[in-house]
Image (cartoon, grey):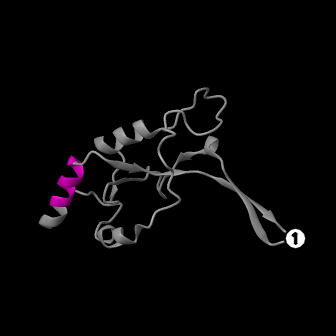
Amino acid sequence: MSPTVVDDAVEAARVAKRWVRYVLPVMVEVDCDEDELTRVVTLPEEIREDRDDIGHFVIYDEKFVRRHSDEQPQMHAFCVAEPHWTHDSLRVGPPSNWPETIEWDEGFDLTETDDAYAEVNPYADPR
């Protein structure tokens, strides 16, 4: 393994921030007479962890490089990020442990991470 890959893996282990990916369904209302979208509603009560094609949780480091979900920093992030509701049997509204003061971004422009991500096989051992 090249020194750069080893240095990146060591740096990723030191960094304390991780991105845990979730799937959040949305409902889109369509006015069929006008052929336009009239409303988009998120369904946070149906949120779930995202998994890859072989069942591993999808977790990235702060440089958006995919990391193994069974290693300590990723498992810690996964446990902290897990959504909880005030009444788990009534999953209404956003999770109670996700701060409402945080602005929800509309999406990511990950084009700046494409080159860094392309150098790492997301299924390989990053060490």
Q: Is residue 1 above or below residue 98?
A: below
Which of the two residues, 101 or 25, is positioned nearer the viewer here? Answer: 101
The crowding category of the residue bearing disc 1, from other C-alpha atoms within 10 Å (few below 14, some 14 to 19, many at least 20), is: few
Q: Point out the stretch of residues depicted in magenta.
A: 7-14
Residue 70 visible in rendering: yes
Kind of residue at disc 1? Asp
**Residue at the (63%, 41%) spot, across then down:** 45
Q: Position of residue 41 (x, y in %)?
A: 68, 52
Q: Say which quadrant the C terminus sits in.
A: bottom left
Front-most of residues 98 and 7: 98
Q: Which residue is mark 1?
A: 33
Question: Dot 1: what SS?
Answer: loop
The image shows residue 8 at horizontal and vertical percentages of 20, 60
Identify the image quadrant of residue 47.
top right
**Could you tell me residue 4's position as x and y percent?**
15, 66
Which residue corresponds to the image point at 41% horizontal and 67% vertical from the top-left?
Answer: 110
Q: Determine if residue 71 is in view.
A: no
